[in-house]
């Protein structure tokens, strides 16, 4: 299973057994793993959780994504693997009274979140299933 490889990556980076249950790892959505979830599972710092996710990316287990969020609904309006791939602007819907108005915003001014997903290609090669 994919979460066993993640567990191995965590142990490797920590230099010993991780104090997280396999059940907790299995509850993660393999298509959207946020560093905050890893931080919470391990009870560790934000920095270490980010390093674990980046290590899993270097090992080919994860693919790193960046999403730009709408300032109005908080939903993702653009998702890329590298920040230089963001479009210069995105169209969002801004609530006005009981309606919505289309608005174009610069992506550079919007909140960005990094998340990771299981690298399906590498997982398939290794015989790992979601």
Image (cartoon, rainbow, N blue to C red):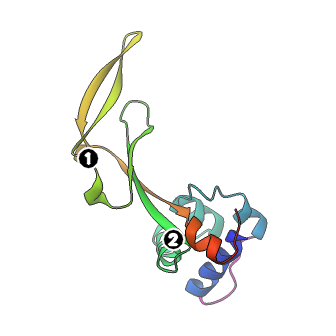
Residue 121 on image: x %, y %: 56, 69
Residue 86 on image: x %, y %: 28, 51
How many numbered dots are placed on residues in this image? 2
Label at residue 87: 1
36 relative to 86 in the view: left or right = right
Dividing the picture into quarters, in which one does residue 82 lie? bottom left
Determine whether 82 is above or below 87 in the image. Answer: below
Determine whether 124 is above or below 77 in the image. Answer: below
Please give the name of the residue rendered at 62% of the width and 71% of the height, measured from the top-left corner: 123
2 relative to 85 in the view: left or right = right
Label at residue 38: none
Label 2 sits on residue: 53
- Label 2 Cα crowd, 10 Å radius (few <14 / some 14-19 / many 20+): many
Please give the name of the residue rendered at 55% of the width and 84% of the height, measured from the top-left corner: 13
| Callout 2 secondary element | helix
80 or 24: nearer the viewer: 80
For the record, the magenta segment spans 15-21
- Label 1 Cα crowd, 10 Å radius (few <14 / some 14-19 / many 20+): few
Determine whether 39 is above or below 97 in the image. Answer: below
Asked if residue 111 lies in the magenta stretch, the reply is no
Please give the name of the residue rendered at 60% of the width and 80% of the height, measured from the top-left corner: 9
Please give the name of the residue rendered at 53% of the width and 69% of the height, measured from the top-left corner: 62
């Amino acid at each position: 299973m994919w979460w066993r490889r993640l567990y191995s990556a965590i142990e490797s980076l920590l230099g010993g057994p991780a104090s997280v249950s396999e059940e907790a790892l299995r509850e993660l959505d393999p298509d959207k793993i946020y560093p905050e979830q890893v931080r919470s599972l391990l009870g560790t710092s934000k920095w270490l959780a980010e390093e674990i996710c980046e290590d899993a990316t270097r090992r080919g287990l994860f693919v790193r994504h960046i999403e730009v969020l709408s300032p109005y609904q908080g939903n993702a309006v653009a998702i890329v693997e590298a920040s230089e791939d963001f479009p210069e602007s995105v169209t969002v819907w801004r609530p006005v009274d009981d309606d919505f108005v289309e608005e174009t915003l610069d992506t550079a001014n919007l909140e960005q979140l990094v998340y990771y997903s299981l690298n399906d290609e590498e997982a398939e090669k290794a015989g790992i299933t979601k």
